[in-house]
Image (cartoon, rainbow, N blue to C red):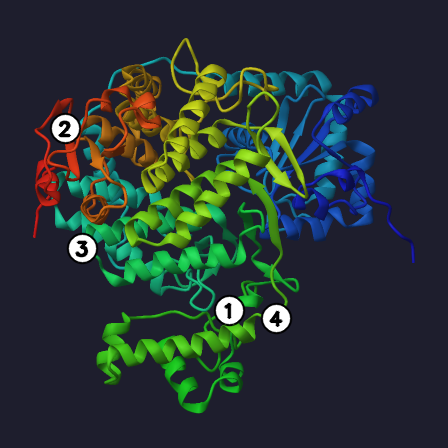
Amino acid sequence: MSIISPNRLISEKSPYLLQHAYNPVNWYPWGPEAFERADKEDKPIFLSIGYSTCHWCHVMEKESFEDLEVATLMNGVFVCIKVDREERPDIDSAYMTVCQMMTGSGGWPLTIIMTPDKKPFFAATYIPKETRFGRSGIKDLIFRIEELWKTHREETIRSAEKVVNVFKQATSGSPGDDLGETTLRMAYEQLSRNYDEQHGGFGNAPKFPTPHNLLFLLRYWKRKGDEQILRMVEKTLTSMRRGGIYDHIGFGFHRYATDKRWLIPHFEKMLYDQVLLSMAYTEAYQSTAGKKEYEQTAREILTYVLRDMTDAEGGFYSAEDADSEGEEGKFYLWSEEEIGHILATKEAELFTKVFNIERDGNFQEEATEKRTGKNILHLKKSLDEISSELRIPSEELYKRLEETRAKLFAAREKRIHPHKDDKILTDWNGLMIAALAKGAQVFDEPQYEKAARQSAHFVFTKMFDANGRLYHRYRDGEAAIPAFLDDYAFMIWGLLELYETTLEPIYLQRALDLNTTLLRHFWDHQKGGFYFTADDADTILVRKKEIYDGAIPSGNSVSMLNLLRLARLTANTGFEAKAAQIVRAFSEKLSEAPFAYTQMMVALDFTIGPSYEVVIVGNRHAEDTKAMFKALRNAFIPNKVVLYRPADEEASDITRIAEFTKDFVSKEGKATAYVCKNYTCELPTTDAQKMLMLMNEKVT
């Protein structure tokens, strides 16, 4: 038995690259060595981009990259480069755009074949080993590319240059006009046309959560008062929570549903989905005057992250795989027989009814569509409805189900777990800090505040270079890869939420410091908006500006709202001017299809207003001060910023950051709220209910 020596990926930190370190393909990481060899040996480059929890990436590896015949062909014709899209989103973004331009679609694994000077002339996603069903196999492709490179070189290079030129044109644009409420209405109407009234969510299968759609709709409901908008959000959230996309045993959401009913998930779990969905459920809880189902779901999501996705030093891991023991979803599926062995008879009968367990199973093999005997747990009705049907009091039903869930969880923990991608990404950790801080405020949960602080401390101590610039990735004791726009934008978002949670000015100052670096190194001084990469970073084809709010919001969308909040927190109108430039920089795209940019619509909603600045002056530990903050946190008032000014300090850190607060004092020794709306300030009040009324909140 021959032992395969590792390739150059063995020295990398990325779990995805390390998964391929023993492939017979002579993989290189992205870097000068690979491109110099391609130029020296006059070979095209085979670029493969994926991530460690990608199901079809695993399939392509097993079929082709572990196959000695395929690897020999690849090594002979190409210089082969592997990239982890989560480590290098700049590379992924550039070549994914190219793939979409060339083929009309995209996805992972992403395959690009290009010249030694990085100009692409072929793009595809998953490629099978052998040609089948009209899809070219990788062996045939290698022979065709080799022939093309040898006999049609000039034509191939002209084609690659044309692709790059079209790419540059597609990623450039001229500043346009300001946008207003008409754009918000268009975004709502486009989402409404795409809304699935029967099952919730948008579009058909596959169906993605896209929580920022819901965050926008909640704000549009707040603006318009149309209960139909709120019903869209609630239907979507309840359908997802009851569906198979939710892990009813261990909590947290899977990546997406392969069907329109939210029943059959693609089983991987991504950190960013947990973050954004927890925010959506938290805001729905505020919007519905405290519906328990939304609080429970938000808390369970955060329980999953804190239990399974948290590093001992405070950072958060990236993802968990869909596969275990070579099978997608095996870790999460249950047979009726297995449940019967774990639970007592009456427990099993109740659990089987509630979670719709079938003897033959409800999960089918994709290839044969045969029942597997395995079940995806899901609810068809609310637990209150089930309680009524079964004539079991709600509290008793909840208690019994929690007892059975705990038993099944303990049994499931003994299974072989899916692979965990334990790299820590600055951008996703920034999002997680924001979600935890928001949850700490709304649910008055100290555990969430503590976890958010620990993550921020991790970033402060581990993720900065000697020049005060952020790194993007941390793993196995090493911080590396200069940060991208999203790292700065999402971390600023997290720090702003953490400031409003802890009321400690250090977090606001850190956000301002990061914002200074962001403006210095990422801002487009000619057309406005932020580039994805810094001014001293390597340029991949062209220096791109991202705006699409896809699986996660774009850095420009988040930065626009950050700038607006920082402007109101510090009275620095220059930040607001920058936010306006972001809208104008992308106004043409935003006007055409605003529903594709819902996080940007969240920022635009803040711009249009009404928006509020609230300064609370008082003794932080006094009951009346706590009551002021509690009133603010219980209500859904998304377009506001909140500052705390200690009453007993003439000069404090907050007055140095927000100088306009230095003359604010408490009235009659009581906690006092100063409320400003659209640049106009009201008289201060010591009444928490009056404070809410000044923000047009209904007081019950």
- Alpha carbon separation for disc pair 2 and 3: 24 Å
Report the front residue among 681 and 489. Answer: 681
- Alpha carbon separation for disc pair 4 and 3: 40 Å
Mark 2 or mark 1: name the one nearer the start of the chain: 1
- Choose top left, top right, bottom left or bottom right for residue 642: top left
Query: x%, y% of residue 211?
Result: 35, 46
Q: Residues within 10 Å of mark 1 (few under 14, many from 20)?
A: some
Q: In the rendering, which numbered label is found on residue 364? A: 1
Q: Residues within 10 Å of mark 2 (few under 14, many from 20)?
A: some
**Amino acid residing under circle 2:** Lys
Report the front residue among 364 and 349. Answer: 349
Mark 4 or mark 2: name the one nearer the start of the chain: 4
- Alpha carbon separation for disc pair 1 and 3: 40 Å
Mark 4 or mark 3: name the one nearer the start of the chain: 3
Report the front residue among 633 and 286. Answer: 633
Indicate which label's residue lies in the foreground, 4 or 2. 2
Q: Please name the residue shown 55% across and 33% down the image.
A: 89
Disc 4 target residue: 415
Q: In the rendering, which numbered label is found on residue 289? A: 3
Q: In the rendering, which numbered label is found on residue 677? A: 2
Tag 2's secondary structure?
A: strand
531 vs 224: above or below: above
**Amino acid residing under circle 4:** Arg
Indicate which label's residue lies in the foreground, 4 or 3. 3
Query: x%, y% of residue 484?
Result: 52, 27
Q: From the image, which quarter does the N terminus lie in? A: bottom right
- Choose top left, top right, bottom left or bottom right for residue 290: bottom left
- Alpha carbon separation for disc pair 2 and 1: 56 Å
**Amino acid residing under circle 1:** Gln
- Alpha carbon separation for disc pair 4 and 2: 55 Å
- Alpha carbon separation for disc pair 1 and 4: 21 Å
